[in-house]
């Protein structure tokens, strides 16, 4: 811990004790002791945090970081397994007006850069169009969900 901080804490403890004794109240002394204990606990916790940060920085700058246990997140495109099918998109740079009104927007939790735009046609059929926000492109297929 920084020497200046230690001196300041010691001075604070001394002044708190002197003030409590000057007041002559035992309750004040116990409150002062409690505050000192809380300050010491916070100081110990901060020391652990600083030690952890220093350890990690040391590993990073000394090329001692291990990445074998890290899993690279790969972008995922929808892969249907049910009875609904994907159809090729009509356009690669636009959404057809005949898909209807936009009724919902969702984000893929496994790959947040992909969002789904959900449209409803006048016959209530739902069409999903998928947009990659990072790349500024439409997915090459759309999902159509008929209504019965």
Image: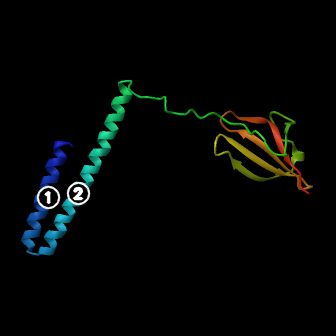
Crowd class of label 1 (few under 14; some 14 to 19; many from 20; radius 10 Å): some
Report the disc number at residue 13: 1
Say if mark 1 contacts mark 2, CB within 8 Å: yes
Residue plotted at (17% across, 45% down)? 4
Residue plotted at (64% across, 42% down)? 110
Residue 93 vertical position relative to residue 99 in the rendered view, above or below: above
Residue 45 vertical position relative to residue 74 in the rendered view, above or below: below
Residue 36 vertical position relative to residue 26 in the rendered view, above or below: above
Residue plotted at (13% across, 48% down)? 7
22 and 48: which is toward the camera: 48
Identify the image quadrant of residue 124. Answer: bottom right
In the rendering, at what x and y percent does residue 67 appear?
47, 29
In the rendering, at what x and y percent does residue 133 appear?
68, 38
33 and 100: which is toward the camera: 33
In the rendering, at what x and y percent does residue 27 appear?
15, 74
Q: Secondary structure at mark 2?
A: helix
Q: Which image quadrant: the N terminus?
A: top left
Q: From the viewer's perspective, tell me whether residue 118 is left or right of residue 22.
A: right
Report the disc number at residue 39: 2
């Amino acid at each position: 811990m920084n020497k200046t901080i230690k001196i300041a804490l010691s001075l604070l403890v001394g002044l708190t004790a002197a003030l409590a004794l000057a007041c002559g109240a035992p309750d004040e002394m116990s409150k002062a002791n409690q505050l000192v204990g809380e300050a010491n606990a916070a100081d110990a916790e901060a020391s652990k945090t600083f030690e952890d940060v220093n350890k990690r920085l040391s590993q990073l700058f000394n090329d001692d970081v291990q990445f074998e246990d890290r899993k690279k997140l790969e972008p995922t495109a929808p892969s249907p397994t049910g009875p609904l099918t994907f159809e090729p998109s009509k356009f690669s740079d636009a959404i057809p007006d005949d898909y209807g009104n936009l009724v919902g927007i969702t984000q893929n939790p496994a790959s947040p850069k992909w969002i789904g735009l959900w449209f409803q046609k006048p016959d209530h059929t739902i069409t999903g169009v998928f947009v990659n926000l990072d790349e500024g492109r439409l997915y090459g297929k759309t999902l159509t969900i008929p209504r019965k």
